Image: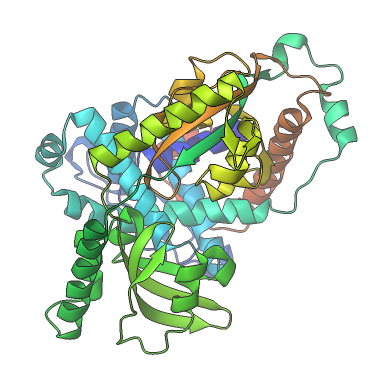
């Protein structure tokens, strides 16, 4: 039951190909207007038609056909007859989006654009290239982004509303033990191989000439915007190295100081005139110029352009050679700093350029936003690509050779890692894998709450469907009246 609800929203996020009507609201029966009597015509002669109505929102036959075609392209299978489950999927989304409007639930523009770009990249992989995708779709990439915007925003709103509904659901250790007490062993979750990794990174030196080039470029943007030649948002779309916000014209949603790089925040919160552009700001990400959009109390909304200085091949090679030398000394126990011998953990504390791990003796942390948990354990797929590739070569306690990677600030760095632990894949146990087992139970409880919410919402909502759809089998009761 709940697995299907999760599945269809995942399908919708990854395979949006249908057009949704603008959300005008979902009303109770008492507020609903009667649907016009159907025009009787041979089905094969109908170009498009309303097949369902949810509140006063129509679901068209073409909506269903587009999502079906998209599902086939993505090799997504439905756990039942798609003729019935696809319109139900669309109807569910309308219920959640309507409630999001009532509860003032919002999603950021950058989140929407990020999801759109993921979808387009998935299509590019299927088509083989951006040019082939544009030919296949009959649209430019830019036009695809535009046409997908409202659809993806509604999907994101529906997802956010679902999270809002279940945000207070909790389970206790007793609930977890009870759930798994009599479960057959082959039904207990399988925990994939997990590893703990320590890392030391080194930022290659960037020559002053390259830094000045970046600053001059940002100054030229400021001059051209100030002169009225074009808008800040246009330059952000064309030239910003922050690709996610760049596609939204450089726009960042309302944020508090703690959510921003300190240097960036100091300038952003001191801006007072939306017509003026900030001085150049250096952060961990690179160099920025910032334009104020709005302030609300202790939160600020700005747009920015980021430019990241380029690392030369020579500088990267020099840093790799230095880290390889350090790795050899650490393996031999001969690495010294100010006359004191250091192990890998101490070296990470004193010489690593990675602020996120430096204060934790180099130990990488895995932040799971969905379950709001932080752990030092990573499944292989959760590690940065470069790190995962090196981990595969190591035994526990070994130190890697130096390698290149892109860090979470989107900067090219050199790194060495040490494999701290490896736990091979196994069936979960309450003592070793409590968090895994807790998440299973928590998901079940959330599914139950969502199912009850949807069932109650359907009862209060006007539903119309063509007769042929009344014969279907649906995930939720109450659609057929």
Q: Residue at x 62, y 38 (%)?
A: 339
Q: Quadrant of residue 185?
A: top right
Q: Is residue 374 left or right of residue 202?
A: right
Q: Nearer the viewer, residue 237 or 420?
A: 420
Q: Residue at x 13, y 36 (%)?
A: 136
Location of residue 391 with respect to 255 vertically, above or below: above
Q: How is the image coloured?
A: rainbow
Location of residue 459 with respect to 435 vertically, above or below: below
Q: Quadrant of residue 319?
A: top left
Among all residues in the image, which is located at the extreme bottom? 273
Q: Position of residue 462 (x, y in %)?
A: 53, 58
What is the count of numbered marks?
0
Observer able to see residue 253: yes
Q: Nearer the viewer, residue 363 or 115?
A: 363
Q: Position of residue 73 (x, y in %)?
A: 28, 28
Location of residue 89 with respect to 441 vertically, above or below: below
Q: Nearer the viewer, residue 342 or 166?
A: 342
Quadrant position of the N terminus in the picture? top right
Q: Position of residue 432 (x, y in %)?
A: 79, 23
Observer able to see residue 95: no
Location of residue 316 with respect to 233 vertically, above or below: above
Q: Position of residue 122 (x, y in %)?
A: 30, 35
Q: Quadrant of residue 309?
A: bottom left
Among all residues in the image, which is located at the extreme front? 339
């Amino acid at each position: 039951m709940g697995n299907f609800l999760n599945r269809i929203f995942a399908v919708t996020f990854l395979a949006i190909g249908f057009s949704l009507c603008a959300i005008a609201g979902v009303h109770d029966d008492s507020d609903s207007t009667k649907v016009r009597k159907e025009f009787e015509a041979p089905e094969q002669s109908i170009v498009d038609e309303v097949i369902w109505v949810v509140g006063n929102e129509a679901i068209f036959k073409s909506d269903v056909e587009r999502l079906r075609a998209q599902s086939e392209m993505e090799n997504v299978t439905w756990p039942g007859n798609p003729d019935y489950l696809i319109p139900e999927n669309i109807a569910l989304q309308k219920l959640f989006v309507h409630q999001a409007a009532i509860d003032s639930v919002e999603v950021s523009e950058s989140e929407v654009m990020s999801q759109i770009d993921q979808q387009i990249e998935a299509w590019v992989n299927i088509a083989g290239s951006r040019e082939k995708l544009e030919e296949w779709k009959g649209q430019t990439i830019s036009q695809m982004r535009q046409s997908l915007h409202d659809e993806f925003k509604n999907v994101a709103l529906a997802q956010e509303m679902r999270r809002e509904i279940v945000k207070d659901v909790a389970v206790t250790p007793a609930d977890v033990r009870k759930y798994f007490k009599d479960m057959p062993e082959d039904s207990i979750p399988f925990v994939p191989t997990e590893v703990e990794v320590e890392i030391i990174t080194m930022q290659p030196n960037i020559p002053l000439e390259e830094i000045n080039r970046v600053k001059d470029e940002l100054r030229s943007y400021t001059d051209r915007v100030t002169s009225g030649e074009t808008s800040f948002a246009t330059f952000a779309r064309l030239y910003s190295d922050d690709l996610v916000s760049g596609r939204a014209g450089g726009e960042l949603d309302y944020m508090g100081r703690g959510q921003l790089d300190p240097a960036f925040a100091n300038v952003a919160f001191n801006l007072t005139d939306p017509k003026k552009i900030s001085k150049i700001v250096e952060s961990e990400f690179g160099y920025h110029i910032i334009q104020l959009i709005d302030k609300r109390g202790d939160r600020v909304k700005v747009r920015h352009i980021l430019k990241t200085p380029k690392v030369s091949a020579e500088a990267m090679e020099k840093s790799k050679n230095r880290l390889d030398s350090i790795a050899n000394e650490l393996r031999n126990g001969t690495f010294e700093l100010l006359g004191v011998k250091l192990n890998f953990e101490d070296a990470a504390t004193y010489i690593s350029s990675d602020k996120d791990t430096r204060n934790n003796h180099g130990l990488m942390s895995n932040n799971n936003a969905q379950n709001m948990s932080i752990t030092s354990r990573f499944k292989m797929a959760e590690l940065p690509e470069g790190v995962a590739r090196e981990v595969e070569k190591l035994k526990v306690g070994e130190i890697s050779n130096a390698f290149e990677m892109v860090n979470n600030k989107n900067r090219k760095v050199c790194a060495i890692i040490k494999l701290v632990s490896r736990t091979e894949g196994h069936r979960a146990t309450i003592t070793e894998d409590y968090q895994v087992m807790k998440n299973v139970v928590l998901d079940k409880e959330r599914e139950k709450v969502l199912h009850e919410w949807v069932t109650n919402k359907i009862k209060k909502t006007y539903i119309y469907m063509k007769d042929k759809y009344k014969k279907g089998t649906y995930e939720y009761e109450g659609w057929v009246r």
